[in-house]
Image (tube, rainbow, N blue to C red):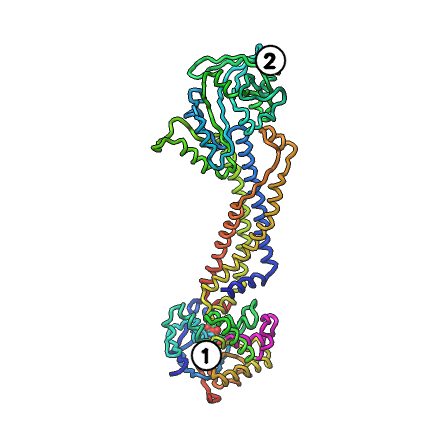
């Protein structure tokens, strides 16, 4: 076997330049592909993480049908022990309780529809860093009886700290909810829609205003590692399923994929474009490898004829030519991956900061304007598999060629 | 029984517009230990005959019996094995694997036969010494002269311990002095190991070295002269 490996290896270097060009094309393609994939997946991870941190969390437990109906009638009672059980699942970083509803807020002659969010101030701050967003006044405590308004909303209402606004809405089971509340803080959000329509109170106070004691509309769950999403999602589901395994009719348990379907879709579209680009790149590479293999085959017809004549079985020649194809391809993949690795690690740790219009556009979405990179073993494995597939398919050419060789004709040339 | 028995072999190439009768009813017997030249003008059928005897080509009619076996009964794969174990080949050119050294080329045929490394090395060294290239074992073919390359081809042909060696115009690319010394080598091996050589040639000087001369004309045996009796 070693002799065949040696033979294949030396055959490669009969035409050094050609082999180097073929391998180099694979090398550069692999680097390019890895950079592209790293940037794309990095960007997706970043979008997901930002979006999850901005509001939804990775997983949410909601009252059954709350997602469609958005009414307090679909809110839930979630016992403290149950929440403890969720928090004890390995990989769960944080749980965040909320009681949300829409209400009218009036001040003077101005009235707006506002999303009132009842929060646990400490939990909410850990998830969305709400405290850091306060630009005036003070943040909430659990027993606060004040409200925090988004900056844009406060401007529309023309209110300042200490002014009292009127909340008017519907509580649980149609009870009227009306409350005069002092503004205790103003928070600035980067996402324009949020900045114009959000207001926060503490959960106990929200439960009191809306006559919904012990009620929550959602429990958001953050996890340490997004790759564990499906496992943890399943775990939580099993925690809430009825013991006989029937559909749960009290809770919905949704992942960010269901909570942010637009995000999922935009990632899918972008990813598909990326894969098409990669496909084109690899078609070019495949031609490079294939062309080299074809030349290496065509110029050795006489030699193949002689080797078969003196008693070399054809399958042994197949072995040698296949090894040659593998070598050409794998010199490129391995060196490409090796060079990419430190490059990617550098970019993962030092994301490229964006400037100009692009930065503004991203800022408007509430994300920091950077071009993040990610690195996963899967990206490298995918390259190896792709090139392996190209090599194996290209390797069929010499095999088919040799299969048809008749030594007498081959030697006559 | 003869080593090689060629019975009424006819070969017609009918792939072309006009079918060519390359061999016409050839009947020959070749005994172990012969040093025989197949001669004749270009197109007379020398290569065709050697190819059929070597199991590289199949006769249109007639058969070839080697070591008492009709080689037309072999399946293609068995034929490859038969060539590997029974016949040593020397061709006019491109005999050697260019990326292997002299020694590796000689060893390769034994590797195909499944011999172990130590045995291969020992025999390759012996054979390269025997063909006078003991000091060039680690040179690649491109670093050797045409005559030296053909000597290695002879060493390779003998490495498999064949029943006989077929050489199609082994001296065609060599100058006459080099051709002479290759013939010396082959004749010595014939004498020393009683190795049978069947070679084709146009070259009058090479023809004169043969112990038996078979002359072909238009695919038929025109003359068959015994010049020198085997010892
Ligand atoms: N594959 C083939 N198809 C058609 N005709 C062929 C084929 N091979 C050989 N021939 C013909 O068969 C005849 C004998 O050819 P062969 O090669 O055996 O001659 P040769 O004696 O070896 O000639 P040379 O001295 O030129 O090598 C020639 O007329 C040749 O053209
Ligand atoms: Mg010929």
Tell me the residue at 44%/13% (across/down).
A175
Front residue of this view, candidates B204 and A18: A18
Q: Residues within 10 Å of mark 1 (few under 14, many from 20)?
A: many
Front residue of this view, candidates B72 and A362: A362
Residue A365 at x, y percent in the picture: 58, 29
- Left or right for A15, reference B199: right
Q: Residues within 10 Å of mark 2 (few under 14, many from 20)?
A: few
Q: Is disc 1's CB within 8 Å of ligand 2?
A: no
Chain label for disc 2: A
- What residue does disc 2 label? A163
Quadrant housing residue A41: top right
Answer whether residue B139 is magenta in the image.
yes
- What residue does disc 1 label? B164
- Can you say whether A9 is above or below B73 in the image? above
> Mark 1, mark 2: which one is toward the viewer?
2
Kindly tell me whether residue A320 is visible in this rendering: yes
- Can you say whether B2 is above or below A195 in the image? below
Front residue of this view, candidates B59 and A71: A71
Distance of mark 1 from mark 2, alpha carbons?
114 Å
Residue A387 at x, y percent in the picture: 52, 51
Residue A140 at x, y percent in the picture: 57, 21
Tell me the residue at 54%/47% (across/down).
A380
Kindly tell me whether residue B25 is visible in this rendering: no
- Can you say whether A185 is above or below B224 in the image? above
Helix, strand or loop at label 2? It is loop
Tell me the residue at 61%/30% (across/down).
A363
Residue A61 at x, y percent in the picture: 45, 29
Q: Which residues are magenta?
A: B132-156
Helix, strand or loop at label 1? It is strand
- Residue at the limit of the structure toward the right, as seen here: A356
Tell me the residue at 47%/64% (across/down).
A316
Answer whether residue A230 is magenta in the image.
no
């Amino acid at each position: 076997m070693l002799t065949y490996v040696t033979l294949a290896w030396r055959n490669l270097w009969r035409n050094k330049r050609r082999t180097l060009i073929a391998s180099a094309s694979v090398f550069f393609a692999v680097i390019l592909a890895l950079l592209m994939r790293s940037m794309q997946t990095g960007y997706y991870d970043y979008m997901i993480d930002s979006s999850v941190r901005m509001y939804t969390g990775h997983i949410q437990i909601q009252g059954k049908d709350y997602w469609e109906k958005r009414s307090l009638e679909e809110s839930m009672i979630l016992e403290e022990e149950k929440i403890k059980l969720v928090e004890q699942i390995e990989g769960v970083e944080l749980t965040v309780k909320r009681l949300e509803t829409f209400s009218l807020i009036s001040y003077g002659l101005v009235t707006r529809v506002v999303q009132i969010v009842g929060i646990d101030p400490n939990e909410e701050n850990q998830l969305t860093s709400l405290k850091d967003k306060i630009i005036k006044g003070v943040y909430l405590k659990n027993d606060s009886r004040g409200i925090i308004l988004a900056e844009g909303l406060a401007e529309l209402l023309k209110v300042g700290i200490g002014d009292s606004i009127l909340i008017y809405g519907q509580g649980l089971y149609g009870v009227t909810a009306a409350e005069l509340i002092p503004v205790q803080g103003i928070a600035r959000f980067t996402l324009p829609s949020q900045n114009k329509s959000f207001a926060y109170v503490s959960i106990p106070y929200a439960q009191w205003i809306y006559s919904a004691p012990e009620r929550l509309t959602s429990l958001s769950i953050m996890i340490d590692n997004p790759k564990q999403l499906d496992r943890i999602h399943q775990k939580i589901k099993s925690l809430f399923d009825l013991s006989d395994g029937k559909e749960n009719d009290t809770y919905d348990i949704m992942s960010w994929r269901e909570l942010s379907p637009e995000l999922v879709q935009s990632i899918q579209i972008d990813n598909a474009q990326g894969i098409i680009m990669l496909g084109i790149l690899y078609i070019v590479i495949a031609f490079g490898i294939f062309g080299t293999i074809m030349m290496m085959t065509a110029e050795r017809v006489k030699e193949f004829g002689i080797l078969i004549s003196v008693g070399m079985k054809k399958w042994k020649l197949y072995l040698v030519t296949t090894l040659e194809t593998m070598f050409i391809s794998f010199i490129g993949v391995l060196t490409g991956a090796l060079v990419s690795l430190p490059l990617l690690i550098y970019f993962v740790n030092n994301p490229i900061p964006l400037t100009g219009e692009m930065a503004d556009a991203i800022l408007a979405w509430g994300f920091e304007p950077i071009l993040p990179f990610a690195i996963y073993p899967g990206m490298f494995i995918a390259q190896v598999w792709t090139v392996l597939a190209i090599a194996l398919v290209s390797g069929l050419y010499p095999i088919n060629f040799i299969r048809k060789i008749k030594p007498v004709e081959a030697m006559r040339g | 029984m003869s080593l090689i028995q060629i019975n009424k072999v006819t070969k017609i190439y009918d792939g072309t517009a006009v079918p060519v009768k390359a061999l016409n009813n050839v009947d020959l017997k070749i005994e172990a230990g012969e040093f025989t030249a197949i001669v004749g003008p270009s197109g007379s059928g020398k290569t065709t005959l050697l190819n059929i005897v070597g199991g590289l080509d199949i006769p249109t009619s007639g058969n070839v019996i080697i070591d008492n076996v009709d080689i037309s009964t072999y399946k293609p794969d068995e034929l490859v094995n038969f060539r590997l174990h029974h016949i040593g080949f020397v061709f006019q050119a491109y005999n050697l694997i260019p990326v292997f050294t002299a020694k590796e080329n000689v060893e390769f045929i034994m590797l195909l036969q499944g011999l172990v490394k130590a045995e291969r090395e020992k025999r390759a060294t012996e054979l390269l010494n025997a063909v006078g290239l003991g000091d060039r074992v680690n040179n690649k073919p491109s670093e050797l002269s045409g005559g030296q390359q053909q000597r290695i081809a002879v060493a390779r042909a003998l490495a498999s311990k064949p029943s006989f060696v077929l050489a199609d115009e082994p001296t065609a690319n060599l100058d006459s002095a080099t051709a002479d010394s290759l013939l010396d080598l082959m004749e010595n091996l014939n004498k020393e190991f009683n190795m049978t050589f069947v070679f084709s040639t146009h070259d009058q000087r090479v023809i004169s070295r043969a112990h038996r001369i078979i002359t072909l004309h238009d695919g038929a045996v025109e003359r068959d002269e015994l010049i020198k009796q085997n010892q």
